[in-house]
Every structure is written in structure tokens, then in C-alpha cells.
Amino acid sequence: MSNGLSIAYRNLESSDAIEDHVRRRFSDLDKLEAKIESCHVVIEAGQRQTSGREFTVRLKIAVPGPDIEVERTVGRSEPAKDLNLAIHEAFDAARRIIVERKPKRGV
């Protein structure tokens, strides 16, 4: 269902590696049978500081019922690691929400 996936960048150039990472994580969510209608991802780089740079990843996932909105900010070490960690944490949070909302079978 990758047709419903959109990725936007703020203060950051797009890259194939970032997009591949987001697509893989989205594919994992899609396999949960959550009836995802669309997923909008915003990846934002904060201003450079002496101690590094913060990265924020926002997800807005349209599903039946209330949409899932998640935001994670990371900025502790190397930029590539921080960006990947922010993506990872945002999608993990979305996954937990989807699993919690999923009706229990056989109950």
C-alpha cells in the first residue's frame, strides 16, 4: 500500500537511504492488517548546535477510527544515527498504537 505513503523534508535534503528506511518501516506497519489508508511522514532537521543536531520525525497515519499521530525527536550523537533512531522510534510508537487498537481474536 505504498501508494498512500508520502515523505516530506524540512531543513534537510532527501536521500534514497532515508526513503528506503521509511518505506521498510511502513511496510512492517502495513503487514499488521491495520487498514492503513495513508501515512504522511515529515522528517525535520533542527538548527545545528555545538553539541549536534536534533531530528524530529512526525507520522500521521490515517486508519479507520481516530488517526494515529506520533512525533519523536532525537539528537544525541552522530547525525545519521540520530535520524535513523528518530525514524525507528516513531514507527515503533505507531506500531504499539496499532497493536493496542487491534481487536482481539477469539475473545
Image (cartoon, rainbow, N blue to C red):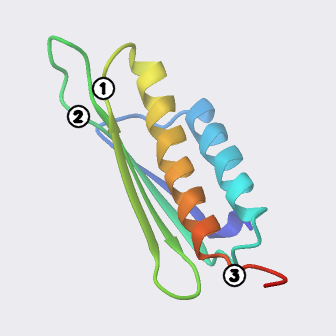
Residue 99, by quadrant, is bottom right
Residue type at mark 3: give it.
Pro
Q: Position of residue 55 (x, y in %)?
A: 33, 34
Label 1 sits on a secondary structure element that is: loop
Q: CA distance from mark 1 to mark 3?
A: 36 Å
In front: label 2 or label 3: 3
Residue 75, by quadrant, is top left
Lower position in the chain sequence, tag 1 or tag 3:
1
Residue under the point 44% across and 30% down: 83
Q: Position of residue 65 (x, y in %)?
A: 52, 88
Residue type at mark 2: give it.
Gly
The residue that disc 1 covers is 75
As drawn, which residue projects farthest toward the right?
106
In front: label 1 or label 3: 3
Lower position in the chain sequence, tag 2 or tag 3:
2
Lower position in the chain sequence, tag 1 or tag 2:
2
Front residue of 97/24: it is 97
The residue that disc 2 covers is 46
Front residue of 38/85: it is 85
Label 2 sits on a secondary structure element that is: loop
- Give the numbered dot on residue 14: none
Q: Position of residue 61 (x, y in %)?
A: 52, 69
Considering only vertical position in the picture, is 59 above or below 51?
A: below
The residue that disc 3 covers is 103
Bin the neighbour count of mark 2 within 10 Å (Cα to Cα): few under 14, some 14-19, many 20 and up. some
Label 3 sits on a secondary structure element that is: loop
Q: CA distance from mark 1 to mark 2?
A: 9 Å
Instruction: Assess whether mark 2 and mark 1 are in contact (beta carbons under 8 angstroms).
Output: yes
Front residue of 10/41: it is 41
